[in-house]
Each structure stands twice: as C-alpha cells, then as structure tokens.
Image: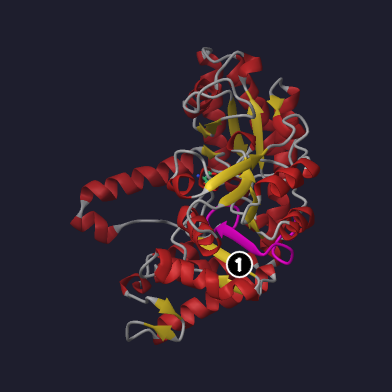
C-alpha cells in the first residue's frame, strides 16, 4: 500500500513534509517500544473518516444531538464486538485514552480521599495507577504492592494483608512494564474480602488476551480497562469492560462525569480493529508476538543483560543495562542512532532517576506486525547486545544500520 497526502500537500506542505518523514521513520526503523504498533489501512481509514465531524454526547439511542442514526450503528457495533471478543457483560468504548479511562473508573467508585491499592510503578505499574505526580494521586490515596524483581512473583498474602489494613475501595492490578501473568482470581478474592471493586488495566496485553494467548481477566474481574492501540492494534483510545452490575456507574462516570463528545471516528476505527482482532490471523499474530519475545529475551540474557522478573510471558522484556556499563538513557540513545527504537525504563528499586534509569523496555508487537519471526528476533537480539557492549564502535554501528535497512526492506510496512 502506498500512503500519500495529496490534499494536505496542496494546503499545508509543512505538515505534509513532517507526515511523510514520520512515515519514512516508521518504515525504515525497527520499532521495539512495547506499547507501540501499526494500525491496518482499514483502521486508519475509519480514523480519518467523516465520523469525526459529529457530536454525539450520550450513548447509542440516547443522544443529546440529532442526526446520530449512523453514529449509533458505529458505536453499538464497537460495543457488541468488544463484548463478544472479551466475553464482557458491558462495554464502554468512549474513553479518549488510557488516563481518562482509569480516572473514570476511580471516580465511579471512590470519593476524594478514598484508598486505591495498586502495583508500584517501579515494579511495572503505570503512571495512571496513582504515581504521586498525577492528579489522581492528589484526589485519592494510593497504597502499593510490589513483586520479586528476580522472579516477578507477587506475594498475594502480602497484598491481602495490605488490603485488610488499608481498606481500599479498588484493588487494582495491571502494568506497563511487567512481563509475567497475574492471578486474577486471587486479586478478585482479595477485593471481595475487603468489600472493594476489583480492577485490571490490561492496556498492554489486550491483543494477547483477544488472541487467546494470555489469560482473560474479563470474566473474573469486576472492571477491566484497556487502551486500544497497543497489542490490540487499534486506534489510540480507551475502553472499559465490566460486569453488568457496574454498567450504569461506569457509563455515568465517563459521560457526563468526565468527558464531553466521544470521538466517533476513533470508535469507528476501534470497531474495525475489533473485527480484525476476532480473526484466526490475529490469534496467530498474538501467539507470534509472545514467541518472538521469548527468543529475544533469551538472546538478551545470553548477551549479559539482567532480565527482570525472570523472563517474559507476554510481549515485553524489562532489562537492566547497568551490567554492560551503560545507563538506560545511554542504551536508548545508542540503539536509536542505528534505527532501533526502545525506551529507557526504571527497574524495581532503581537507584537511578526516571530520566536516566537503569533499564530499557523492549517489545515485539510492532515488529511482529511487519511479519518478523524467531530468526529475526535472534538476529536483532545479537545486534542489540553488540551495540550495547561496544557503544563507541563506529564499524559495528555502520554494520547495524545496514542490517536495519535490510530487515526493514525485507519486511515492508505499508
Ligand atoms: N505510554 C504507555 C506505555 O508506554 O506503556 C502507557 O501509557
């Protein structure tokens, strides 16, 4: 497929230039940021569609504006597909993205000052799960559990003790830099014991759940939130799945509680992505994402990186680069210089600061979308180790650039 921007080029050459350069950057580099992926042309078409022109406050069949007969079809289709794909009793597809989605859930079940129990950011949790710099942390009181950095094991007895002592209104699990499976039944049982709502943020792994490769939290947990653009490969956005008894509270919290008009172009694109995610091809994709991560993880470990949490069950690897004599920022920069994109990341109990932490986070979803498999992961893993072990060696960098060029031409994007 050839992407071009004829109308933008005519009206606004500066933006056309930047878009074309960004397209080339994506085509010509190895995208290994664990939260990024490439939408299909069909999803992109829906995202750039006329649905963007419409105001549709309310929900299908109950709108505050006229002219929503076709928008209702779009939003109801997205809802029905989300429910079918994940086995959910209720779906709200309006959250604009991950942060408002999680805030909506907090506001549905907590008053200001109430307690929420979530995973520590340094142990793989997420900024929106109550990091002190967020607005949520100013409104609610967050308490935290951690995991064993070497094995990734969560001490569920300790989580239960914290819950009994702190009496949270929400027991929250989910992550953005954790690589193991979670025991949803135990999280839910702990929430029930203390009279809390159980919540899972599956933003990173929604596509792997949809593809049947990882456990599905939806039938177990009261509330499951997810962004829609990571492993799920949809447009940027958020979605809340929940049990029927919480449907009203969630819908009210999203609109009118937190948001105004939903972005119906985003919802149309989500509907298309959910249809794609229900296909056998997508299940194969999800399985390949995890198989690729296993191979990459073993290459990185064999090359001397300290892999956190004892390995990976999903699409990502969190690795400490300090054993190779680098910081996370330096490692990110060395790889970026040859067209391999990863992000620096804090590791558990990191002695370093967030802008130059000890680790990097690496993921396989985007390269798997391009069709890369185990042999390419092995090759890329070895390349990463060579670059990190020899950060000033220009010969290795020149060879690496040539390899990136060859691989990206062999596995074209768009
Ligand atoms: N920014 C996303 C990530 O990289 O994990 C999460 O919001």
Near-viewer residue (42 or 266) = 266
Whether residue 366 appears in magenta in the rendering, the answer is: no
The magenta segment? 212-232
Horizontal and vertical percent for residue 150? 76, 29
Q: Can residue 35 be seen in this view?
A: no
Q: Which residue lies furthest to the left in this view?
A: 11
Q: How is the image coloured?
A: secondary structure
Is ligand 1 less than 8 Å from the beta carbon at label 1? no
Q: Can residue 266 be seen in this view?
A: yes
Q: How busy is the neighbourhood of tag 1: few (under 14 within 10 Å), some, or many (20 plus)?
A: many
Residue drawn 41% across the image and 43% down it: 24
Q: Which of 54 and 99 is in front in this view?
A: 99
Q: In the displayed structure, would residue 235 be above or below residue 288?
A: below
Q: What residue appears at the point 63 percent right and 52 percent down from the top-left corner?
A: 168
Residue toward you, 340 or 100: 100
- Residue 229 colored magenta? yes
Percent across and percent down for residue 217 are 71, 60
362 up-or-down from 198: above or below: above
The residue at which mark 1 appears reads as 241
Disc count in the image?
1
- State the image coordinates of residue 406 (x, y, percent, origin top left): 56, 35
* Secondary structure that dominates the magenta span: loop
Side of 225 relative to 255 (left or right) = right
Q: Is mark 1 on a helix, strand or loop?
A: strand
Q: Quadrant of residue 146?
A: top right
User: Where residue 241 sits in the image (x, y, percent)?
Assistant: 60, 67
What residue is drawn where x is 66% and y is 40%? 178
Q: In the rendered view, tell whether residue 312 sits above or below residue 211.
A: above
At 55% across and 65% down in the image, what residue appears? 273
């Amino acid at each position: 497929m050839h992407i071009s921007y004829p109308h933008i080029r005519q009206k606004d050459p500066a933006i056309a230039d930047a878009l074309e350069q960004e397209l080339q950057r994506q085509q010509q580099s190895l995208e290994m940021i664990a939260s990024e992926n490439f939408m299909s042309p069909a999803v992109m078409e829906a995202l750039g569609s006329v649905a963007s022109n419409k105001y549709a406050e309310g929900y299908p069949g109950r709108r505050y504006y006229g002219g929503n007969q076709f928008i209702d079809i779009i939003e109801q289709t997205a809802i029905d597909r989300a429910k079918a794909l994940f086995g959910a009793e209720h779906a709200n597809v309006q959250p604009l993205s991950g942060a408002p989605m999680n805030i909506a859930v907090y506001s549905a079940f907590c008053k200001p000052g109430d307690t929420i129990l979530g995973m520590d950011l340094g142990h793989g949790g997420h900024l929106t799960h109550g990091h002190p710099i967020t607005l949520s942390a100013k409104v609610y009181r967050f308490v935290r559990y951690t995991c064993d950095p070497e094995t990734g094991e969560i001490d569920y007895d300790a989580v239960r003790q914290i819950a009994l002592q702190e009496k949270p209104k929400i027991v929250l699990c989910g992550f953005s830099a954790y690589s193991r499976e979670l025991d949803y039944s135990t999280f839910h049982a702990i929430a029930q014991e203390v009279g809390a709502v159980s919540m899972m943020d599956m933003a990173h792994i929604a596509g792997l759940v949809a593809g049947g490769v990882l456990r599905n939290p939806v039938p177990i947990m009261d509330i499951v939130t997810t962004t829609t653009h990571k492993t799920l490969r949809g447009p940027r956005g958020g979605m809340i799945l929940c049990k029927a008894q919480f449907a009203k509270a969630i819908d009210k919290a999203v609109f009118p509680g937190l948001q105004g008009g939903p972005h119906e172009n985003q919802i149309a694109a989500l509907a298309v992505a959910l249809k794609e995610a229900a296909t056998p091809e997508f299940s194969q994709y999800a399985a390949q994402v995890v198989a690729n991560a296993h191979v990459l993880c073993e290459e990185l470990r064999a090359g001397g990186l300290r892999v956190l949490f004892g390995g990976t069950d999903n699409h990502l690897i969190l690795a400490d680069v300090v054993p190779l004599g680098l910081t996370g920022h330096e490692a990110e920069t060395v790889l970026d210089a040859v067209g391999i994109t990863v992000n620096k990341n804090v590791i558990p109990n990191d002695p370093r600061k967030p802008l130059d932490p000890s680790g990097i986070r690496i993921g396989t979803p985007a390269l798997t979308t391009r069709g890369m498999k185990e042999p390419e992961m092995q090759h890329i893993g070895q390349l990463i180790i060579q670059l990190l072990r020899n950060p000033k060696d220009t010969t290795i960098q020149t060879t690496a650039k040539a390899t990136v060029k060859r691989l990206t031409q062999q596995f074209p994007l768009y």
